Amino acid sequence: MTREPPPDERLALLQSWLQQLPHRLELQPQTLRPASSDASFRRYFRIDAGAAAVSAAASSFGSSIALPDVGSFIVMDAPPAHEDCRPFLHVAGLLARQGVSTPQLIASDLDLGFLLLSDFGSITYADAMLHEGTDVAALYADALAALLRLQQARPGTSVPAYDRGRLLAEMRLFPDWYVAQRLGMELAARERGVLDATFDILVDAAVAQSQVLVHRDYHCRNLMVLDPRERNPGVLDFQDAVLGPITYDLVSLLRDAYVEWPEARQLDWAARYWELAREAGLPVPEKFDVFWRDLEWMGLQRGLKVLGIFARLYHRDGKSRYLADLPLVLKHTQRVAERYDAFSGLARLLERVHQQSPLTGYTF
């Protein structure tokens, strides 16, 4: 006889909570279904509701709210033992005040870790770009405009600093999880010394940049296509925001782990952002070549981190979906390591562990 799996206690708790919410929301519990999951312990469900209830929820936030008429809400399940909903709500408020479209809170129980949120629909930037005829230039122009608004927020001490310790801890995931666990290789003492020196250079460069509000995962899977365009994009997964380097979110967008853009297009978008940032009074370098180098080095830090995180998600957490994205992240990482003398040691290390040829690209 096949043994039945243990019941999902949190799902039962969630269903009970939903049933206690006001009848005016016209929730339809039988429609509760998975919406998405991410690399954390959070998971998301979609639940249908009466069209009038969704419309009323939208109107209660005023005319500027970005709520598509989809007839449903999103439910976030964030187990309190592992996740805290409060940073999500705080950052959502910061971004909304800057005119960035974020999910709006409809109901919550912070002690249980449940949020009922407005629904942006199901079309991410990543989904939209799979369809022929999508106006990619318009989507990315909207994403850059939203990023500029995000970076003009003034969080003060209300979000943590992306400090040396945090930046360094992230990069150390690379030797521990990607090299040791994923590749099954042991680095020599000299190679560990090369990594330590590389990490120091990248941390020094990151903390020397102007510090602004940083989303930390500003990429095509966390940006939703909204209509009308004035609302685009809907921004998700911002609860880990920090005060950090001004190029971090831009390089996350241009050197996405999930979609590859030619470097000529990256340069064009980066130059457009840089010009707009200067007009907006954001503290970017006066010279574009300095800005581009900052962006490249920031991308190298992020690449090393992401290689480690994606490997850990598989080997520790059993999440295999990210393995398919490792080659592109590695390509981004190798390309920058190969073009700057400061990272020649890292480039040789990457060549040894992968037996691959050097990559080339733009520098100034």
Image (tube, helix red, strand yellow):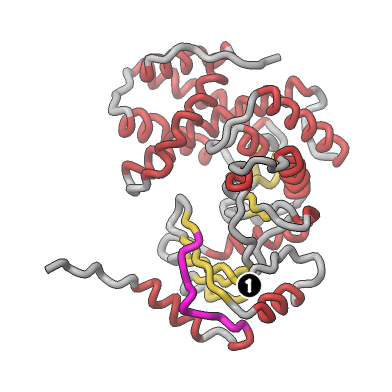
Lateral position of residue 222 relative to residue 324, left or right: right
- Compared to residue 79, the image places residue 264 above or below, namely above
Q: Residue at x 61, y 50 (%)?
A: 124
Tell me which corner region of the image, top left, top right, bottom left or bottom right, holds residue 65. Answer: bottom right
**x then y, percent, for residue 19:** 49, 84
Q: Residue at x 32, y 18 (%)?
A: 188
Looking at the rendering, in which quadrant would you find the N terminus? bottom left
Give neighbour class at mark 1: few <14, some 14-19, many 20+ (Cα, 10 Å).
some
**x then y, percent, for residue 334:** 50, 20
- Compared to residue 158, the image places residue 71 above or below, namely below
Q: From where the camera sits, is residue 247 visible?
A: yes
**x then y, percent, for residue 330:** 47, 27
Residue at the right extreme?
279
- Compared to residue 227, the image places residue 134 above or below, namely above
Q: Is residue 33 magenta?
A: yes
Which region of the structure is painted magenta? 25-35
Secondary structure under tag 1 reads loop
Amino acid type at image mark 1: Gly
Can you identify the residue that label 1 sits on? 71
Looking at the rendering, in which quadrant would you find the C terminus? top right
Q: From where the camera sits, is residue 98 visible?
A: no
Which of these two is toward me, 122 or 304? 122
Lateral position of residue 196 relative to residue 117, left or right: left
Tell me which corner region of the image, top left, top right, bottom left or bottom right, holds residue 158. Answer: bottom right
Q: Residue at x 67, y 30 (%)?
A: 208
Tell me which corner region of the image, top left, top right, bottom left or bottom right, holds residue 10. Answer: bottom left
